[in-house]
Image (tube, rainbow, N blue to C red):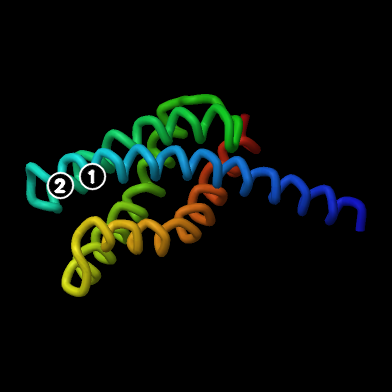
Amino acid sequence: MEMFLSNLNQNIKKFLRFTLVGIIAVMIQYSMFYLLDNYFIYRWSFIISYTISFIVNYILTTFYTFQVKRTINTLIKFISGHIINFILQWVFLEVFVLIVNSKVALIISMMLAFPINFMILKFLLNKEKKNE
């Protein structure tokens, strides 16, 4: 039971750190998207803002959230997880942009992709920590 509670506590801490890093990444992505969307079509704004946010997110996620070394292997795993996140956000954006404006559609897309992304990265990067 004690081991279960300890693992639960660690997972809660990781999720809270992931949430904080996620908020920072979302703020970067959305603020960049908001600015770029005034000059480019929403698809280009999405790609550029996602890329900038991705770089910051990788650094913070490896250093703070999951506390693993930044290696080629963690980068590949992070990219793998974020390819799925990118596709999810893109698909949700394409769907919701038909209903609401692109700025609102991106918010909905990010909210829907967030919990899926956590589970994927937790799985991929926790394996890395065990292999250190």
The reply, left or right, for residue 76 in relation to residue 33 is: right
Q: Residue at x 91, y 58 (%)?
A: 1
**Element on which disc 1 rests:** helix
* Position of 7 relative to 17 (above/below): below
**Element on which disc 2 rests:** loop
On-image quarter of the C terminus? top right
Outermost residue toward the right in this view: 2
Number of the label disc, if any, that sits on residue 74: none
Residue at which label 1 appears: 33
Q: Residues within 10 Å of mark 2 (few under 14, many from 20)?
A: some
Q: How far across and how far down the image is residue 71, in percent?
A: 46, 25
Q: Residue at x 49, y 31 (%)?
A: 60
Q: How far across and how far down the image is residue 69, in percent?
A: 54, 25
Front position in the image: 20 or 71: 20
Residue at which label 2 appears: 37
At label 2, which amino acid type do we have?
Asp
Front position in the image: 76 or 39: 39
Q: Residues within 10 Å of mark 1 (few under 14, many from 20)?
A: many
Labels 2 & 1 near each other (Cβ < 8 A): yes
Label 2 to label 1: alpha-carbon separation: 6 Å
* Position of 91 relative to 60 (above/below): below
Task: Please tell me in which quadrant of the rendered image residue 18 appears.
Answer: top right
Number of numbered discs: 2
At label 1, which amino acid type do we have?
Phe
* Position of 69 relative to 28 (above/below): above
* Position of 45 relative to 57 (above/below): below
Front position in the image: 122 or 33: 33
Outermost residue toward the bottom in this view: 99
The reply, left or right, for residue 99 in relation to residue 65 is: left
Q: Residue at x 59, y 37 (%)?
A: 66
Q: How far across and how far down the image is residue 30, in percent?
A: 31, 45
Q: Residue at x 51, y 39 (%)?
A: 21
